[in-house]
Image (cartoon, coloured by chain):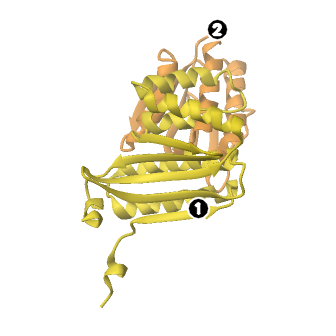
Amino acid sequence: MNLRTENVKLENYSLEADAAGSPPLIRLKGTFDMTATGALSLFLVSIEGEVRRLRWQDFTIDVTEVYYLSSSCIKSFVTLIEALKKLDFHPRVRIIIHSRLDWHERTFSILSRLAPTLITLDKAG
Amino acid sequence: MPSNAQNRRPRFIRVEFAPASGCLGSIVQIVTDFCRNVVDDQETHFAFQLAAYELIENLVKYSSGERVIVRVEVESTPLGPNIVLATENEATSERLSDVNARLHAAESAADPIVHFDQLVQESLASPGESRLGLGRLRAEGDLVVTHTINNETLRIEVRRPVYRSAREICE
């Protein structure tokens, strides 16, 4: 299935979406400070559009190679999750965090507390 | 033979600069390198990386003056050493009033995680900005946060005790 979401690859971070496998995989890598906020926000809005268009029942977000996520970027995730909560088919999101980076659990558990029935955190690495 | 000064680790670094997003990564790097020099603890490194990004992003976004200050230091106390990160900037009275209220709420929250979850809910009503950064300092960084406002200058300090190699440079 071809996605309408454009991948982003810059010096400090990258954003990739791949629906070739099942479930679809979103992968973030790098440092997401304030300079990444605009690109991440647009990317996640596009992902939300694909979830609606293709009626994804579940998908995975791999953040194991994320080294920093700013509060503005957290807000972009919060906006995505609030939009997903309003869909009638309740897609489930599995977020893969790094098992040895304790801050990953603290940061991304904010999202699972926001939508505990939709979001699960799994550790890898 | 190298002198004692050459062998000693840094006690503080102070950087004064004109706020611009292009400075962000390099100033954060100075803070995180300082922390790695004085303490061997990933949690402390993360806490000060988080604080550096959030506080310096705020300097870039909200400072009304032409120069801002970032200072990171090892502070000796009777209970042991702390790492302290401080930022100073000028801001408009409207901005100072807003940040004063938000910092008081963050500093006095009985449970910083509950407080942060409230901020996340409130952020949904502010599409243009996150307003989450100051709340993260305690909730995710486990940092003690204090602030003062003098005239139009805001000073924010975050600190955290350290138990390992920083003790050596305080003795």
- Mark 2 sits on what residue? A88
Q: Which residue shows up at 63% across the image and 51% down it?
A: B89
Residue A95 location (% of width, % of height): 49, 31
User: Among the chains, which one is yellow?
Assistant: B
Residue at the limit of the structure toward the front, as seen here: B151
Mark on residue B35? none
Q: What element carries label 1?
A: helix
User: Among the chains, which one is orange?
Assistant: A
Residue type at tag 1: Ser
Q: Residues within 10 Å of mark 1 (few under 14, many from 20)?
A: few
- Given the image, what chain letter belongs to the residue carrying mark 1? B
Q: Is residue B77 left or right of residue B13?
A: left
Q: Is residue B169 left or right of residue A3?
A: left
Residue A30 seen in the figure:
no
Q: Nearer the viewer, residue B170 or B78?
A: B78
Q: What element carries label 2?
A: loop
Q: Which residue shows up at 25% across the image and 57% down it?
A: B164
Q: How crowded is mark 2: few (under 14 residues within 10 Å), some or many (20 or more)?
A: few
Mark on residue B26? 1
Residue at the limit of the structure toward the top, as seen here: A88
Residue A72 location (% of width, % of height): 62, 37
Q: Which residue shows up at 68% across the image and 48% down it?
A: B63
Relative vertical location of residue B161 with respect to residue A26 in this rendering, above or below: below
- Given the image, what chain letter belongs to the residue carrying mark 2? A
Q: Nearer the viewer, residue B55 or A71?
A: B55
* Quarter occupied by the C terminus of chain B: bottom left
